């Protein structure tokens, strides 16, 4: 740590909790940030508003390179980003920023932390190349109440090789958490130090993720209603209606030797044979198994024949036998229906004939 940091203390159990002077103000700001989220569910920025230039350092490298982690615990409201310090709602961090000063080259990575300082997600390392505000694209999940932090990898090896990403806050109501080396993955680790009156110059944009596919809805996901894609939403499926075949002619040649069918296209033809049968009316229907009621007649199914037909006139051998049985003398009705593989189905066409 740079010797210029004032008021540092070790986080131990015996140390009484310090209640920030502006706790109520920070709470009010956070509630306002939630209330002011865009109705369309757009992005919100949490962390520091980056309005201050760095004037303090962290992760001091002396003879060997060092690493450290930092996170803002509390911050006066005037220095906070519009969304406050913690995520007002869950979503995806789509970009983050860091403001730095000094010529030392270092690597930085954004961390998402829960209330117990456990790591939720972490961005790839990025290298700020000059003084000023640096913006990096990323894609990190974040839940409501999570906060952000940063890992610093100071690769310089020399006397007082510093990384300036901090500033002395004007109001005495800010706390900054510090770990060295970096906060380890899959661990819950209290800060090595919590420093008064220091601001950390990082912030991040959170976008909603309505379909929970891990892509921010505002800039990364072109189809927020479909979790199977973050590209453009697929267009409506084109339903091609089935072509309905037409039977224009159904006839039986004299002598009952051939059936002639004219169809509008290739199809599977179903020929249904039914024999006219005497019966009596019962319960509003004509039935054969009754001895009372008015005499009537109905057609009783005796068999089915199928054939593949082409467009135009088709000649099909007459069915002298159906299911191995020869047709008995009497009156019959032949019904033809044509169907196609895509679901097209013709209207039924019938003709009567007689077996002598």
Image (cartoon, rainbow, N blue to C red):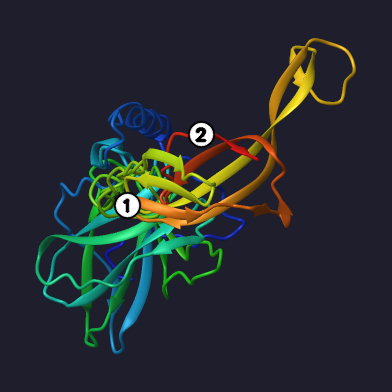
The residue positioned farthest toward the right in the image shown: 291
Could you say where residue 152 lies in the image, as x and y percent from the top left? 31, 71
How crowded is the residue under tag 2: few (<14 C-alpha within 10 Å), some, or many (20+)? few
Q: Which mark is residue 351?
A: 2
How crowded is the residue under tag 1: few (<14 C-alpha within 10 Å), some, or many (20+)? some
**Residue at image x 36%, y 45%?**
262
**Front-most of residues 214 and 116:** 214
Q: Is residue 116 left or right of residue 9?
A: right
Q: In terms of secondary structure, where does tag 2 sit?
A: strand
**Residue at image x 44%, y 41%?**
251
**Front-most of residues 107 and 23:** 107
Q: How many marks overall?
A: 2
Could you say where residue 231 lies in the image, as x and y percent from the top left? 27, 55
Mark 2 or 1, closer to the camera:
2
Q: In terms of secondary structure, where does tag 1 sit?
A: loop
| Vertical arrangement, residue 14 with respect to residue 277, above or below | below
| Vertical arrangement, residue 19 with respect to residue 139, above or below | above
Residue for badge 1: 311
Q: Is residue 222 left or right of residue 245?
A: left
**Front-most of residues 307 and 125:** 307
Could you say where residue 290 lies in the image, as x and y percent from the top left? 88, 20
Q: Is residue 19 left or right of residue 29?
A: right
Looking at the rendered image, the quarter that the C terminus falls into is: top right
**Residue at image x 50%, y 56%?**
307
Question: Can residue 23 be seen at all in this image of the molecule?
Answer: yes
Q: Is residue 169 left or right of residue 299?
A: left
Question: Can residue 144 be seen at all in this image of the molecule?
Answer: no
């Amino acid at each position: 740590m740079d010797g210029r940091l004032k008021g540092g203390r070790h986080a131990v159990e015996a140390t009484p909790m310090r209640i920030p002077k502006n706790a109520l103000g920070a709470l009010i700001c956070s509630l306002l940030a939630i209330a002011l989220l865009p109705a369309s569910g757009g992005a919100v920025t949490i962390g520091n508003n980056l309005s201050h230039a760095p004037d303090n350092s962290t992760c001091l490298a002396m003879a060997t390179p060092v690493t450290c982690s930092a996170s803002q615990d509390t911050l006066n409201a005037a220095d906070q980003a519009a969304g406050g310090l913690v995520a007002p709602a869950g979503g995806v961090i789509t970009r983050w920023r860091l403001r730095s000063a000094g010529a030392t080259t270092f690597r930085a990575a954004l961390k998402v932390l829960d209330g117990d300082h456990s790591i939720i997600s972490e961005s790839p390392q990025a290298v700020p190349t000059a003084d000023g505000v640096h913006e990096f694209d990323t894609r990190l999940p974040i839940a409501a109440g999570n906060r952000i932090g940063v890992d610093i990898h100071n690769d310089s090896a020399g006397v007082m090789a510093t990384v300036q990403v901090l500033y002395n806050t004007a109001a005495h109501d800010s706390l900054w958490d510090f770990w060295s080396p970096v906060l380890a993955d899959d661990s819950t680790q209290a800060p090595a130090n919590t420093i008064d009156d220091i601001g950390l110059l990082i912030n991040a944009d959170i976008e909603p993720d309505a379909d929970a596919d891990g892509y921010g809805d505002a800039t990364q996901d072109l189809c927020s209603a479909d979790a199977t894609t973050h590209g453009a939403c697929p267009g409506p499926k084109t339903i091609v209606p089935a072509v309905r075949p037409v039977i224009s002619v159904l006839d039986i040649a004299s002598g009952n030797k051939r059936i002639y069918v004219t169809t509008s296209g290739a199809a599977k033809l179903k020929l249904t044979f039914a024999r006219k049968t005497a019966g009596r009316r019962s319960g509003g229907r004509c039935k054969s198994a009754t001895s009372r009621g008015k005499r009537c007649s109905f057609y009783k199914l005796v068999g089915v024949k199928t054939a593949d037909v082409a467009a135009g006139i088709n000649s099909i051998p007459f069915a002298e036998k159906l299911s191995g049985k020869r047709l008995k003398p009497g009156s019959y009705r032949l019904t033809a229906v044509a169907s196609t593989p895509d679901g097209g189905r013709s209207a039924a066409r019938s003709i009567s004939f007689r077996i002598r």
